Amino acid sequence: MAHDLIGSWLVVHDGTRLTRARVVETEAYGGMDDPASHAFRGPTKRNEIMFGPAGYLYVYLIYGMHWCMNMVTGASGDASAVLLRAGELDVPTSDGKRFETKALRGPGNLTRGLGITGADNGMDCCGGEGRSITIHRPRSNAPAIVVGQSKRIGITKEVDRLSRYFFEGNDAVSKFPTTKSVKG
C-alpha cells in the first residue's frame, strides 16, 4: 500500500472547502513484527486505531509540536499503517483559475498544509459525513511516476528495512537516499 499511494491525491473535505495534496513520500510500518512501529508492543489507547479496520487515519504528535498522519492498512486486529511523509499541495492562484504547487517536505509540514490535527485521529479515509478525507488514484492518462525505495528515515529501530517509497526526482520529497535507491 505504501508504494501504491505514491502519486495519489489526498483530499480533505471540510464543509465547502477542499484541500488537496499529491502524495510523494511514504513509509510502511508493520505491527507487532516491526520494532519501529507504534503497535509493536500491542494495542494501547494511543495506537488502537492502527489495529484496524483499514481505511482510517492514525494521527499522533511528535516532539510535542508536529502532527503525523498514517493511513491504517491492515484488517481488524492486524496492526499496520503507512506514514504519509511528504506531498505537493495544490494552491489556487489569486485569479482562481489555476493551481500552483507548494512542497510539503516532512510529515509535520504535510499535516499542517492539509490542516490535519489530533482531532482527525480516526477519520474515515473513504469520505463520510462532515469533515473527511478521501484518496484518489492518478488518472489513467497521467504521466508515469518512477517510485524509488529506500530505508526508512528518522527512526532508530529496524533502520535497514526497505519500507520507504518516494516519487523519484520530486522536489517535495523530504530526503533522497545517499545510496542508489531500489526502484519499486
Image: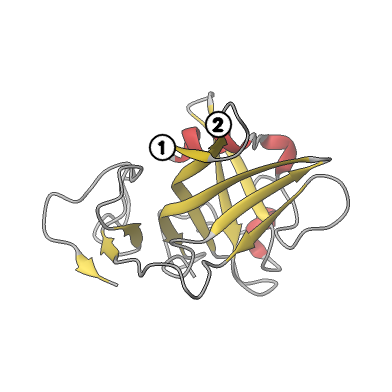
Q: Position of residue 177 (x, y in %)?
A: 19, 51
**Number of numbered discs on residues:** 2
Q: State the residue position of label 2.
A: 93
Q: Position of residue 110 (x, y in %)?
A: 50, 39
Q: Can residue 161 be seen from the camera position used here?
A: no
Where does residue 20 sit, x and y in percent of width and height?
60, 46
Q: Quadrant of the C terminus?
A: bottom left
- Residue 103: quadrant of the picture: top left
Q: Is residue 162 left or right of residue 110?
A: left
Q: Is residue 96 shown to the viewer in this render?
A: yes
N-terminal label among 2 and 1: 2
Nearer to the camera, 79 or 3? 3
Disc 2 to disc 1: CB gap under 8 Å? no
Q: Quadrant of residue 101?
A: top left
Q: Tell me residue 108's x, y (percent).
A: 49, 34
At mark 1, the secondary structure is strand
Q: Residue at x 32, y 41 (%)?
A: 174
- For marks 2 and 1, give the one nearer the viewer: 2
Type of the residue with mark 1: Ala
The residue lying at 50 percent from left, 75 percent from top is 140
Amino acid, disc 2? Thr
The residue identified by callout 1 is 103
10 Å crowding of disc 2: few (<14), some (14-19), many (20+): few
Q: Is residue 115 above or below residue 18?
A: above
